[in-house]
């Protein structure tokens, strides 16, 4: 019998300014566990992604990530309190109730990548 168990999936998130983006993700609470060869491995508990020191023209503005959380209000407050909106000039939207039975907000990173943070309702 073949072992087809998947242990993890990670996206390669683009960055226009690698150093700036690394600091942004650390400021919102992600841990940079390793870095090398133009790629930084970030995680928050069991959730992870790879930040790459590469960005094709308009790639970041068309790149979206989704995080499903247990308490979207706590996450919104956490991001707001981190100071990243002012420090990095990024966008943080209010929490909205979506027709697909989620409450969410959007956070853009310094490259324009949209992170949608949501909870099921």
Image (spheres, helix red, strand yellow):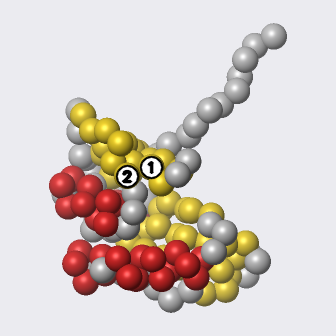
Q: Please name the residue that numbered disc 1 is placed on.
A: 43
The answer to which of 60 and 24 lies nearer the viewer is: 24
Label pair 1/2, CB-CB below 8 angstroms: yes
Per the model, the C-alpha gap separating discs 1 and 2 is 5 Å
Q: Secondary structure at mark 2?
A: strand
The answer to which of 12 and 45 lies nearer the viewer is: 45
Taking 16 as reference, is 96 left or right? right
Query: With respect to residue 120, does 32 lie above or below?
Result: above
Identify the residue at image location x=58%, y=37%. Answer: 8
Q: Secondary structure at mark 1?
A: strand
Query: With respect to residue 77, does 42 lie above or below?
Result: above
Identify the residue at image location x=38%, y=82%. Answer: 81
Mark 1 residue crowding within 10 angstroms, few (<14) / some (14–19) / many (20+): some
Identify the residue at image location x=76%, y=77%. Answer: 121
On the image, which quarter does residue 111 sit in? bottom left
Taking 42 as reference, is 103 left or right? right
On the image, which quarter does residue 90 sit in? bottom left
Residue 27 horizontal/vertical position (percent)? 31, 66
The answer to which of 20 and 78 lies nearer the viewer is: 78
Is residue 118 visible in this depiction of the protein?
A: yes
Query: The N terminus appears in which quarter of the rendering?
Result: top right
Q: Please name the residue that numbered disc 2 is placed on.
A: 31
The residue sitting at the top extreme is 1
Residue 4 horizontal/vertical position (percent)? 71, 22
Taking 48 as reference, is 31 left or right? left
Identify the residue at image location x=55%, y=78%. Answer: 74
The answer to which of 62 and 40 lies nearer the viewer is: 40
Q: Quick one: label 1 or label 2, which is nearer the N terminus?
A: 2
Is residue 57 visible in this depiction of the protein?
A: no
Query: With respect to residue 93, does 50 lie above or below?
Result: above
Mark 2 residue crowding within 10 angstroms, few (<14) / some (14–19) / many (20+): some
């Amino acid at each position: 019998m073949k072992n087809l168990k998947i242990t993890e999936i990670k996206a390669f998130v683009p960055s226009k300014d690698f150093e700036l983006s690394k600091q942004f993700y650390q400021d919102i609470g992600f841990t940079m566990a390793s870095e090398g060869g133009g790629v930084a491995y970030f995680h928050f508990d069991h959730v992870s992604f790879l930040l790459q020191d590469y960005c094709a023209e308009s790639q970041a503005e068309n790149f979206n990530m989704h995080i499903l959380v247990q308490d979207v209000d706590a996450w919104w407050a956490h991001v707001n309190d981190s100071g990243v909106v002012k420090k990095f000039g990024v966008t943080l939207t209010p929490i909205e109730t979506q027709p697909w039975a989620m409450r969410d907000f959007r956070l853009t990173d310094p490259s324009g990548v949209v992170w949608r943070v949501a909870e099921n309702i």
